[in-house]
Each structure stands twice: as structure tokens, then as C-alpha cells.
């Protein structure tokens, strides 16, 4: 009995160790490579701690690429898009859940239908639209289309359907108008749903690649994912020396670490947000 | 859906008092969203469908060609490659992500020390943006100095020409995708597992069920809705694989990693064939819908079979 428990614990710790190492080793190697001088990168032995750590890869990246600008652009676009979506979707989701009006079912059905339409269908028309408006390569081209996303509306509606309307009814009896009820009764109640929608919208905009790749041309508005893709100007098979990999990894570290740190600090909200939207959605 | 009747009663009460006048309030609530939805989502989707019936190079004017683009697809060897690669990628990636995601969730759902560390570690790769993952794994999969091959050779295995060989490149993308996204599936499965009441397990255990029995008769049936959802999401995502391909191989070597979305991108935005590019996007849409319908049917049948 005692022995089998010991064995069970041993198996648990070994497996746990393997899982953690497999998940984190690539990130560790990224850090390790980023701090190695060029000459120590192309070796056939595995060296985790750089023998002579250096920050020259980071200074080179900062000198050669406007990575801070890309990061700033991404922050701005993701924040603006999140605020836009929270505003649009909490209003519309509330109306779709609680109000009766002509066209409600049509709007909801079209919204659901769009969940199945891949965005790749929309990019050519969207690109033409923004070209006509003379707005390609602008922040607006990156932010506005996010407002048409349907996931948030769907989630907000489902959330409002799942909570009782007693408080709203009480406020209505007290003579509050719909907008006031939405602002001071409904929104405070909707905190969990708003958090979930905010996290998903921010993350998906922050990580968005296909549309920003198409619609941006200059570093003035280029976002971080598109900028980072430039690190791969050297492709496998064309690699001449490994000079580029030290810089690539330094750039990768700069792009990856802030989200990782934010995730470590807010992991509870992340995971709640994702499981809520996954399951309850 | 289930609470709809309640909402309806309050609305009817309200409607009874105000039946004599048009109520504009709901429209003010939905109008802002509706504007963005129509201009940036619904409209472009319909326009995309329309463009797929035209021959439209970027500079010229669109010409209506009916189904010519779709007929051209049947004679396009690159499209055949893209379809084949997307299918192979999905056939390998989806089962791996489902099985590993579920196994990790089951393993890290046990009341043991260190499980929180395990969960955070497995999920961490998912918060890294796709292109960074692509850059990182291009280095990890480097034939001569990449960590993966160095680790393999320390076990006495030979060098694998991951991204530079036609035979291995797609597998390199599969490996990267699994590492990057398995944590997401794990989190969804964990949420599903935690919704299963613990009393069910206790009762079954008292009745003498072993752990395999518990898994087969309690975990799997009660996890079915989660399983269905995760399967849908995983399939949809794997059909649309693009970012990693773009960064790591650009579809090469040759057409070894050319996927549907990569092909849409090169057709539409490098060769500027808007009509044909849109037609391939429509094909992707049709494939997604067919899978969604088939899966939903199978799921419903499974549910009614179980009852």
C-alpha cells in the first residue's frame, strides 16, 4: 500500500516534470540564444547558460528594427478595438436579449451565420473598401473592422439571457429610461461577461496577423506580429551563418515576454475568460 | 435560449402598455453594432462571394465570368496541393490536439501538488503571438544547430531536415502548432471536467466502478458537449492554418507546406487575382460549413443514441 502510493507519487512528479520541461524548454532556449554572442550560437552542444552573456543582440534589434513603434501600434490598436467592441456589443447584446423589436431575430441569425464565415472571404472586399477611402495603412483600417466581430455580441446576449431581470424591472418601475438602466444597472452586473469579451478582443487583436499583413505597408502603423515576421527575412535553406538567429531571438523575447508576464499576473482571468467563452458560448 | 420565455413575458407586459406607439429604443441600442457588422463583416462577406464569380485583376475592372473560377479550380495543381496539405495537416494535428489536450487536462485535474505549475506551463506558449512562435521554432527546428535536432542526437538519433525537406516541413509546422495551442484545448477540457459533479464519481466508486469505468461511463458522456466544441474549434482553426506557414516556410519547399489560406494570400495579394482568390476563400467556407453540419449531425445522433 505504502509502496504503491510512493510509486504513484514518483510517476506523478516525473510526468509533471516532463510536461513542464517540454512546454517551457523552447522559451528557455529563446532566452538563452538571445543572450549569447554570435560566435556561441552555432554550436552542436547544448549550452543553456551563455558562457559570456551579452545584450548586443537586443541593442542590434533596437537599432535595426522599430520594434518599440510596432509594440506601441499594437497596444494602441488592440486597446481602441477593445473599447469599441465593448461599447457596441454590450449595447447590442443587451437589446438582443431583453428587448422585443422587429428584425431582432434576423439580426441575431445573421450574427450567428457570420460565426461560420471565415474572415478570408472578407479581406479582399475590405481591402478594396479601405483603398477607395484612401485609408489603407492607417490605424482606422486596423481598428474599425474589429467592430464587426460577432463573438462578443453573441457572448453578451447569452450572458444577459442567463441573469434575472429583477433589478432592471425595479429600475424601470422607478422611472429610469433604457439607457440609464443599461449604464447603471446592467453594465455593473455584466462585469464577468465584459471582462471575458475584453480579454478575447484584446488578445485576438493583439495577435491578429492576416489582415494587418495585408493592410499595412509602413512601420508607422505596422503592428508587432507583422513586424516580427520581418525577422524571418532569412529562410531555412538560405541561412548564411546564424548571425540572424541571435537577433531573431532577442526580438522574439521582446515581443513574447510582456504578454507572458501579464499572463502570469492575470492567469486566473485569462483562463476564466477562455473557458467561459469556450464552454458557455 | 433557455431563458428566452422570461424575457418575452416582461417584453409583452411592456408592449401591452405601449402598444400604440413605435418604440425606437431597441434600434438605438443595436444600430451602432449593426453599422459595423454590415460594413465590415456581412457586406464584405457577400461582396467576397460576388467577386468569386468575376475575373478581376487588381487594376482592371471586374468581369462577370459565372462559375469559371470554380471550374478552373478543378484543373489547378497548386490548389490540389493546398487542399492535400491542409487535409494532411488537419488529419494529424486535430487528433493530436484533442488527445493530448484531454490527457493533459485529466492529468492536471488531479489533486496533487504542482498541478497549478503544470497548467500554467502548458498554457504559456499560447499567449505568445503566432509570428513569434514561428520565428522561435524556425530556430528550434534548424537542421544543424536547432535545439530539437541537438536533443535528438543526444538520444543517438539522426538529424531531421525539418523545414528544408519536402517530406518533413509539414510535420515541423504540425509540431509547432501542437506545442503552441495544446494549452488552449487543455483549458477548455479542464473547465468541462470541473463542471462534472464530484458526487457522481463518489457514487460510482461506491458501486465498485474502477477508474477505467469512471472514465468511460461518467467522464466521457458528461464531457461530450465540451469535446464537441473543442473538436469544432480545433478543426476550424486547423483548416485556416496560415501564420506559422507564412513565417516558417512561405508554403515551401516547393508546395510542401502550401495551405489553403496561404494560397488565398498569394493568389489575392501577391498575384492580385481578386476573383480567383475570393473563389478559393468561398471553397474554404463551403468546406467549413460541410464539416460543421456533418459534425453537428453526428453529435446529435450520438446524443440520441446515448439516451
Image (cartoon, grey):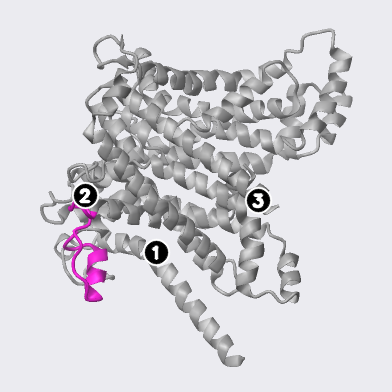
Q: What kind of element bears circle 3?
A: helix
Q: Is residue B1 left or right of residue B95?
A: right
Q: Is residue B66 left or right of residue A90?
A: left
Label 3: chain?
B
On the image, which quarter does residue A253 sit in? Answer: bottom left
Q: Is residue A22 left or right of residue A278?
A: left
Q: Main secondary structure of the magenta part?
A: loop
Binning the other alpha carbons within 10 Å of mark 1 as few (below 14), some (14 to 19) or many (20 upward) gives: some
Task: Give the answer, above or below, for where B184 lies relative to B241.
Answer: below
Q: Does residue A219 appear in the picture of this structure?
A: no
**Magenta span of residues:** B143-168
Q: What kind of element bears circle 2?
A: helix
Q: What kind of element bears circle 1?
A: helix
**Residue at image mark 1:** A24
Instruction: Say the numbered circle drawn on residue A60.
Output: 2
Residue A5 lies, in percent from the top left, at 58, 86
Instruction: Say the numbered circle drawn on residue A168.
Output: none
Q: Which is in the foreground here, disc 3 or disc 2?
A: 3
Residue B234 lies, in percent from the top left, at 47, 47
Amino acid at each position: 500500500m505504502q509502496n504503491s502510493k510512493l510509486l504513484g507519487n514518483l510517476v506523478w512528479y516525473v510526468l509533471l516534470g516532463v510536461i513542464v520541461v517540454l512546454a517551457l524548454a523552447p522559451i528557455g532556449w529563446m532566452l538563452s540564444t538571445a543572450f549569447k554572442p554570435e560566435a556561441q550560437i552555432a554550436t552542436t552542444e547544448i549550452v543553456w547558460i551563455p558562457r559570456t552573456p551579452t545584450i548586443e543582440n537586443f541593442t542590434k534589434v533596437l537599432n535595426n528594427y522599430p520594434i518599440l513603434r510596432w509594440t506601441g501600434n499594437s497596444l494602441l490598436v488592440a486597446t481602441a478595438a477593445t473599447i469599441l467592441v465593448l461599447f457596441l456589443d454590450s449595447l447590442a447584446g443587451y437589446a438582443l436579449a431583453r428587448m422585443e423589436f422587429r428584425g431582432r431575430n434576423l439580426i441575431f441569425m445573421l450574427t450567428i451565420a457570420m460565426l461560420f464565415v471565415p474572415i478570408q472571404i472578407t479581406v479582399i472586399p475590405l481591402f478594396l473598401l479601405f483603398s477607395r477611402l484612401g485609408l489603407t495603412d492607417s490605424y482606422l483600417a486596423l481598428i474599425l473592422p474589429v467592430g464587426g466581430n460577432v463573438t462578443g455580441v453573441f457572448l453578451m446576449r447569452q450572458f444577459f439571457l442567463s441573469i434575472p431581470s429583477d433589478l432592471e424591472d425595479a429600475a424601470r418601475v422607478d422611472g429610469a429610461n433604457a439607457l440609464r438602466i443599461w449604464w447603471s444597472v446592467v453594465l455593473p452586473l455584466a462585469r464577468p461577461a465584459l471582462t471575458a469579451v475584453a480579454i478575447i478582443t484584446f488578445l485576438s487583436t493583439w495577435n491578429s496577423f492576416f489582415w494587418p499583413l495585408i493592410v499595412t505597408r509602413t512601420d508607422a502603423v505596422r503592428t508587432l506580429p507583422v513586424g516580427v515576421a520581418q525577422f524571418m527575412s532569412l529562410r531555412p535553406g538560405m541561412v548564411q551563418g546564424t548571425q540572424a538567429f541571435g537577433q531573431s531571438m532577442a526580438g522574439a523575447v521582446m515581443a513574447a515576454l510582456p504578454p507572458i508576464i501579464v499572463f502570469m499576473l492575470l492567469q486566473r482571468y485569462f483562463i476564466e475568460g477562455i473557458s467561459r467563452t469556450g464552454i458557455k458560448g | 435560449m433557455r431563458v428566452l420565455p422570461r424575457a418575452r413575458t416582461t417584453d409583452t407586459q411592456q408592449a401591452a402598455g405601449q402598444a400604440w406607439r413605435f418604440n425606437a429604443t431597441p434600434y438605438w441600442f443595436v444600430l451602432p453594432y449593426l453599422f459595423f457588422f454590415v460594413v465590415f463583416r456581412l457586406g464584405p462577406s457577400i461582396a467576397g462571394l460576388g467577386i468569386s464569380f468575376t475575373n478581376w485583376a487588381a487594376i482592371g475592372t471586374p468581369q462577370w465570368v459565372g462559375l469559371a473560377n470554380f471550374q478552373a479550380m478543378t484543373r489547378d495543381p497548386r490548389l490540389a496541393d493546398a487542399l492535400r496539405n491542409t487535409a494532411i495537416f488537419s488529419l494529424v494535428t486535430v487528433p493530436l490536439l484533442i488527445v493530448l489536450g484531454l490527457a493533459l487536462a485529466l492529468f492536471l485535474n488531479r489533486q496533487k501538488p504542482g498541478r497549478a505549475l503544470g497548467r500554467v506551463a502548458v498554457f504559456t506558449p499560447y499567449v505568445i503571438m503566432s509570428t513569434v512562435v514561428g520565428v522561435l521554432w524556425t530556430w528550434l527546428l534548424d537542421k544543424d544547430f536547432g535545439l530539437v535536432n541537438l536533443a535528438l542526437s543526444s538520444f543517438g538519433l539522426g538529424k531531421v531536415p525539418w523545414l528544408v525537406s519536402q517530406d518533413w516541413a509539414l510535420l515541423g509546422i504540425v509540431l509547432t502548432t501542437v506545442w503552441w495551442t495544446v494549452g488552449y484545448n487543455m483549458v477548455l477540457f479542464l473547465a468541462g471536467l470541473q463542471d462534472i459533479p464530484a458526487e457522481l464519481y463518489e457514487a460510482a466508486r461506491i458501486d465498485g466502478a474502477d477508474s477505467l469505468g469512471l472514465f468511460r461511463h461518467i467522464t466521457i458522456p458528461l464531457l461530450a458537449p465540451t469535446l464537441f466544441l473543442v473538436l469544432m474549434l480545433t478543426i476550424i482553426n486547423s483548416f485556416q492554418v496560415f501564420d506559422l506557414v507564412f513565417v516558417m516556410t512561405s508554403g515551401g519547399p516547393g508546395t510542401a507546406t502550401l495551405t489553403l489560406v496561404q494560397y488565398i494570400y498569394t493568389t489575392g495579394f501577391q498575384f492580385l487575382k481578386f476573383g480567383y482568390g475570393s473563389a478559393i476563400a468561398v471553397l474554404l467556407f463551403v468546406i467549413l460549413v460541410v464539416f460543421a453540419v456533418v459534425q453537428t449531425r453526428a453529435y446529435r445522433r450520438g446524443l440520441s443514441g446515448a439516451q
